[in-house]
Image (cartoon, rainbow, N blue to C red):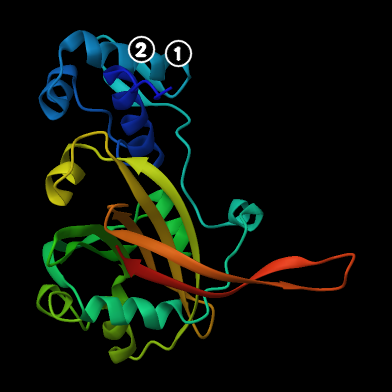
Amino acid sequence: MSQMPLPKYHQIYLLLCEQLAEGRFADGLPGEFALMEEFGVARVTVRRALEKMAADGLISREPGRGTRPIGAPVASIGQGARDVQRANLGGLLENLVSMGLRTSVKVIDVQTVTASASVASALQLQPGDAVQKAVRVRSTREGPLSHITTYVPADVARKFGRRELARKPILVLLEESGVQVGRAHQTITARLADATLAQHLDVSVGSALLAVRRLVYDANERPVQWLHGLYRPDRYAYEMHLSRVGGIDAKVWVNKELSAQFI
């Protein structure tokens, strides 16, 4: 039996929850009419999504004061990340550079912004510190592949901007700036495409995307890049090669190699 699609209000609810977790609504959520226009739905659909968020204790809706987050989770790569299974990246960084050289990139936006709580936590900065935020869409000959947002401490990113980001992979730019890339911690999950992502990646609103969070450290264990990547799963895949190691009573699977591939 085929699975029934999620109701539209629930898709919007999931999208807003993801954006809330990313810290995008620190100053309050958009109004109902703005959400109606963004998602192309009726007001009753938006209201059902917001009512569910309120019932879950995520937002507060007060007449005259708008809709504001309450106790919104802050995404971080800190203590909680230690409970996430870590993959041995091996040659992944080199693979990513190679992929960057084999695709084209469109720079959507580059600017220096103040670090939000989640960005500051990941990069071990203070909230309000300056970071370079860059948004790019990478494509193959078949069309859009990924929507990438990167955050780099301003002192690290001072040697490159829009022109350089349009020409070279950011890992190459980091190394050309004197950064010795050490390791990376990566998590892979899934999320739904909102209106902006749908437009950039040429998919429908609510489409499933592969979501990658990658925190890159230099050789001195300083975080130098936090990446949020959204990939079309019909054009992109991660491949891992696993080996069984250990004694007969404690054999485990160990990742020997991980690569990113086009489909």
233 lies above or below 92: above
The residue nearer to you, when weighing 60 against 250, is 250
Residue assigned mark 1: 55
Q: Secondary structure at mark 2?
A: helix
Q: Of 120 and 51, which appears nearest the observer? A: 51
Figure quadrant of residue 246: bottom right
Residues marked 1 and 2 touching at CB (< 8 Å): yes
> The residue under label 1 is which amino acid type?
Ala
Left or right, 75 with respect to 40, comes to right
In this rendering, does residue 71 appear at all? yes
Q: Position of residue 24 (x, y in %)?
A: 30, 41
Whether residue 64 is visible, yes or no, is no
- Quadrant hosting residue 255: bottom right
Give the image location of residue 179, x and y in percent. 38, 87
Q: Which mark is residue 51?
A: 2
Query: How many neighbours does mark 2 have within 10 angstroms: few (below 14), some (14-19), or many (20 or more)?
Result: some
Residue at 41% across, 50% down: 117
